[in-house]
Amino acid sequence: MTTNKIAYLRKDEAPRLPPPVTKTGVIGWARDNLFDSVANSILTIVGIAILALILPPVINWLFIDAVWTGTGRDACIAEGAGACWAFVYAKFGQFMYGRYPDPERWRVDLTGLLLIAGLVPAAIPQVPFKRETVIYLLVVFPIVGFILLTGGNVDISGTFWLGFAIIGGVLLAVTTMVCMNAGIPLTGPLTAVLSGGAALALVFGVVSFDFGLVYVETQLWGGLLVTLVVAIVGIVASFPLGIVLALGRRSKLPAVKLISVIFIEFWRGVPLITVLFMSSVMLPLFLPDGVNFDKLLRALIGVALFASAYMAEVVRGGLQAIPKGQYEAADAMGLSFWQGIGLVIMPQALKLVIPGIVNTFIGLFKDTSLVLIIGLFDLLGIVTLNFSDSNWASPNTPATGFIFAAFVFWIFCFGMSRYSIYMERRLHTGHAR
């Protein structure tokens, strides 16, 4: 008995069918994330029920029943009135600038625009001239920003001359060493810019400057201006200091390692509120007669040193995650120790700890509200201060002010968080499969 075999050979490619509806779109996302198990389904249903109870009254209070216009508390104490956004509108200038003089607030706006003009091209990978942009942010912008915000009326002599001379020399030496270790040639415009920045710091100790701007003392600064100044200076200063301390703690030189360990453990063991109190109240007691530092400058130094200790531990974690073979590979290529650290080890270590670095930055940004204890009114401090205005005293005013401050803090913190996620994905530091 014989059997006939029938064979079929497809000559054309089978048409591609779309995936099932239950696996794509909103339905697919909900099945995978909200209803993928019995427990998650129960939690999802309970969460939706809680939101259904909470969101309607919150939305009504924030937007529907809110008071958007008014000249005083009368509009905000009406029966059934919600959030008093008229208070935020009336005090918005103070929330942004503090007591900075109204005719001079254009200088703050210009400083912000100059900062954005440097940050945006630095944050977008496709934009060229990264080296020039970094030089602008680290050398040019701080000088221009200082002149705009304070007025640039510099008259320093006596004891301060030595201090500024030291700052100028250290600035030139550090930038030269960093560029040499990173393989950046000190030629052309780079040398001119770095030398010019150091020269300015040196000259500030000898010559008086007057740029024709009205001097605005830091006691008049406040609101978001102080928050951003403290946060930006703390972030920019703590990052390189943290890297140096992390390398020092891993150094094989006993003296360097001991100094780094003592510094890190001391600052990590002291609350920031204590650091600010000591810098504002106790430090002037140890200075010679006639020598004093601006209160905001003392706070900036304290915040930078405090944050650098935490940054050092984050960076040290990244260094410990680098395999020993990477060090051996750098040696095999004939690189010196500092070249190997700057070109091979440190870039990999920093990529690994991007979440930790950004987390430290976010924590520092939120901790800026502690400067209120030394009489500096940041955004939260100036909002709280305006609650005492009897013209706007109402039951809804404090809650509205706190919600506004929280929203502003959230915008900046969320922005830093999202950008760090973008950098992780771009540099493949998440090691996604």
Image (cartoon, grey):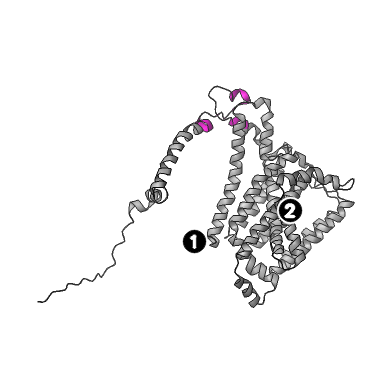
Q: Closer to the camera, 180 or 265?
A: 265
Residue 255, x across and y down, in percent: 77, 65
Q: Is residue 19 left or right of residue 65?
A: left
The secondary element bearing badge 1 is classed as loop
Prevailing secondary structure class for the magenta stretch in the rendered image: loop
Query: CA–CA distance between discs 2 and 1?
Result: 37 Å
Q: Closer to the camera, 150 or 65?
A: 65
For image coordinates 58% across by 45% down, the residue present is 411
Q: Read off the magenta span.
A: 60-87
The secondary element bearing badge 2 is classed as helix
Q: Is residue 67 magenta?
A: yes
Q: Is 89 located above or below residue 419 in the figure?
A: above
Q: Is residue 397 magenta?
A: no
Residue 75, visible in the rendered structure: yes
Q: Nearer the viewer, mark 2 or mark 1?
A: 2
Picture quadrant where residue 101 is located: top right
Disc 1: CA contacts within 10 A as few (<14), some (14-19) or many (>=20): few
Numbered tag placed on residue 304 in the rendering: none
Residue at the disc numbered 2:
266
Residue at the disc numbered 1:
432
